[in-house]
Amino acid sequence: MASESAREPLANLNGTLMPLSEVRISPLDRGFLFGDAIYEVLRVYGGKPWLEEEHWHRLKRSLEAIRLGSIDLERLRRRMHETLKASTFQEAIVYLQITRGAAPRSHPFPTGATPLELLWVQDYHDAYAAVRQTGVQVLTAPDVRWERCDIKSTNLLPNVLAMQAAKEAGCHEAVLYLADGTLTEGTHSNLFGVREGTVLTAPSTNLILPGITRGLIIQLSQRCGIPVTVESLNRAELGDVSELFLSGTTTEVLPVICVDGHLIGNGTPGPVTKRLQQAYREAVVGRS
Ligand code: PDD
């Protein structure tokens, strides 16, 4: 196990394979200077990227939203598969980032800069396996992000600060709320509730990231005969939900049993959450 986890991530920088530690990026890269960049994180199960089409679709959408339309996505996809194959990793994460490239520092888009296309594949040992059984505690924190949270941009400082506050409070995630108490999502996950047997999820607007896992959970709920309502939860109404859970590429389906020190339901993972965890596992195992 120890030697496996020490295997170095394999990177692909603009088409060239190299160990991640050997990647060198210009200090003038706009991703570094301005956060002028977007990213994706994919989970690889048994050597195959999970929900790959959905991730490419969202990547394309993010690129268009930041007006970086010139990227050859088919080429990037080939690079990802080539890198994954060369890595021989079976249980892995693919991190993919595209920036507007390096140019003398100036706010408007540079003319003639070549976008930077970086991806790497890293071994993944599921850090959530134990807490998926027990459930986790979360903290709520004000959502001070911008109004384009639907773009998967690398500008994650509000997420980082809220997550650090959660960690310092002994929590696994911070769930963000707007001024009126509306709960949007986690710092790196989407939020679901269960009220009277119905699964509740925030609408897919500019205020949340349209999570790939969220999309699958909506489908799985419907397949399991569990009704789904698109409705945001409110911080003041958490007493009305019997279950709460988070979703994400690495998180999968993670029960939340306590928010700001208040138990949700009876303080253990609830039946709907467990059913969806099982359905998620079956979907992963049964993938084509
Ligand atoms: N985070 N909301 C936010 C703000 C996120 O950053 C993420 C994912 C999600 C869940 O999306 P998905 O189901 O597509 O993973 C929701 C990734 C994993 C990260 O930043 O590491």
Image (cartoon, rainbow, N blue to C red):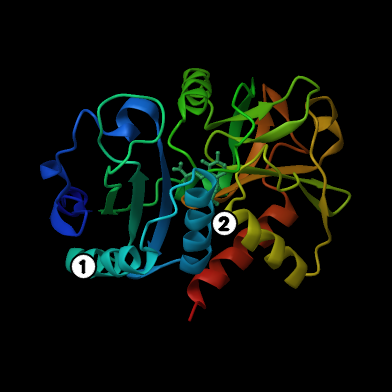
Dividing the picture into quadrants, the one containing residue 50 is bottom left
Q: Percent x, y for residue 97?
A: 35, 47
Q: Nearer the observer, disc 1 or disc 2?
A: 2
In this rendering, the answer to whether 168 lies above or below 88 is: above
Which disc is residue 283 wearing? Answer: none
Dividing the picture into quadrants, the one containing residue 236 is top right
Q: Percent x, y for residue 141?
A: 63, 21
Which residue was labeled with disc 1?
A: 88
In this rendering, the answer to whether 23 lies above or below 260 is: below
Amino acid type shown at disc 2 = Ile
Is disc 1 placed on a helix, strand or loop?
Answer: loop
Amino acid type shown at disc 1 = Thr
Q: Percent x, y for residue 284?
A: 50, 69
The answer to which of 277 and 164 lies nearer the viewer is 164
Q: Is residue 87 left or right of residue 92?
A: left
Q: Percent x, y for residue 267?
A: 70, 36
Q: Residue at x 63, y 62 (%)?
A: 216
